[in-house]
């Protein structure tokens, strides 16, 4: 699987990265764009939360990360001919981090919401998802928004996520319990401290697959539509253009399917 990803990334590099290679020998401009400075520096700094398996999961005490989003970022860096540096940050700090230049891009299962889009630019979406519940109560997993709101249950949500915002706005009778990690949410369901954990479908699917003895249930619903994108600072239109072109080619050469097969099954 990894060899296949590398092979596709190299193919992408020959097409997408050729402009970066051509630019290296050109007469330097008076001021570089963000993309050009990344190529000159030889480093792409990624911001990611590391708390949404299988999209992004921190390892080595927060010094590194793995997941669909990390492989996607590595492939993007490969096309630029630069190294990828990973910076783990809280989910609710990521938009500000890219807007202020602390990181170059954010790839972190980040929903392209109108509010976030007022602060940053988005390339994508590279996948679309929706909200779902992880619970031990089958009736909750298939309940409508109105039924969930009437139930007046406690529900775990990732701090700073669109799931937290969704519960607060759309289900005011439900008590949102903000957690920093999936592990916290899983423990709370086990201990009957909350009725469910609200997250995105790939996350719910991974929790069920990784915890078979808990007999969790989850059903994909149409509670929301979540387009997932890559965030860049509003002034970095050259980087945005490059990233969007990368995603188009990643779709057509099969990279996104390869990553989905690796992380979602």
Image: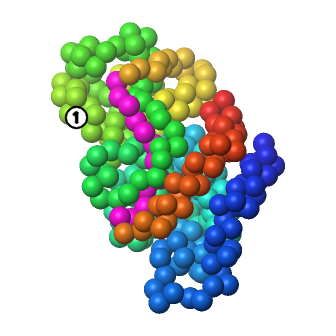
User: Total marks drawn?
Assistant: 1
The answer to whether residue 46 is magenta is no
Q: Residue at left 63%, top 63%?
A: 77
Query: Over which residues does the magenta segment extend?
Result: 223-234
Asked whether 66 or 29 is in front, the reply is 29
Relative horizontal placement of residue 94, taking residue 108 as reference (left or right): left
Asked whether 210 or 38 is in front, the reply is 38
Asked whether 222 or 242 is in front, the reply is 242
Q: Residue at left 66%, top 30%?
A: 265
Q: Residue at left 26%, top 31%?
A: 167
Pinpoint residue 237: horizontal percent, then vertical percent.
42, 65
Pinpoint residue 170: horizontal percent, then vertical percent.
22, 29
Q: Quadrant of the N terminus?
A: top right
**Which residue lies under the disc numbered 1?**
168
Pinpoint residue 158: horizontal percent, then vertical percent.
38, 41
The answer to whether residue 232 is magenta is yes
Q: Is residue 14 above or below residue 8?
A: below
């Amino acid at each position: 699987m990894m060899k296949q990803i590398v092979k596709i990334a190299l193919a992408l590099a020959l097409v997408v990265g050729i402009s970066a290679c051509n630019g290296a020998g050109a007469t330097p401009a008076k001021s570089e764009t963000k993309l050009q400075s990344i190529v000159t520096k030889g480093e792409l700094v990624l911001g990611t939360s590391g708390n949404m398996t299988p999209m992004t999961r921190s390892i080595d005490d927060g010094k590194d990360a793995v997941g669909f989003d990390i492989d996607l970022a590595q492939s993007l860096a490969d096309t630029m001919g630069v190294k990828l540096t990973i910076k783990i940050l809280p989910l609710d700090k990521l938009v500000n981090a890219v807007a202020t230049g602390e990181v170059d891009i954010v790839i972190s299962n980040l929903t392209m919401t109108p509010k976030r889009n007022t602060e940053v630019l988005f390339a994508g979406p590279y996948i679309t998802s929706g909200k779902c519940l992880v619970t031990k109560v089958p009736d909750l997993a298939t309940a409508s928004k109105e039924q969930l709101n009437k139930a007046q249950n406690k529900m775990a949500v990732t701090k700073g996520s669109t799931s937290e915002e969704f519960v607060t706005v759309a289900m005011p009778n439900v008590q949102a319990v903000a957690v920093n990690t999936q592990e916290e949410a899983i423990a709370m369901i086990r201990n009957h401290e909350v009725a469910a954990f609200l997250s995105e479908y790939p996350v719910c699917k991974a929790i069920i697959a990784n915890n078979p003895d808990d007999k969790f249930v989850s059903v994909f619903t149409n509670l929301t539509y979540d387009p997932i994108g890559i965030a860049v600072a509003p002034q970095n239109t050259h980087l945005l253009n490059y990233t969007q072109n990368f995603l188009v080619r990643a779709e057509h050469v099969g990279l996104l399917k390869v990553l989905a097969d690796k992380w979602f099954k």
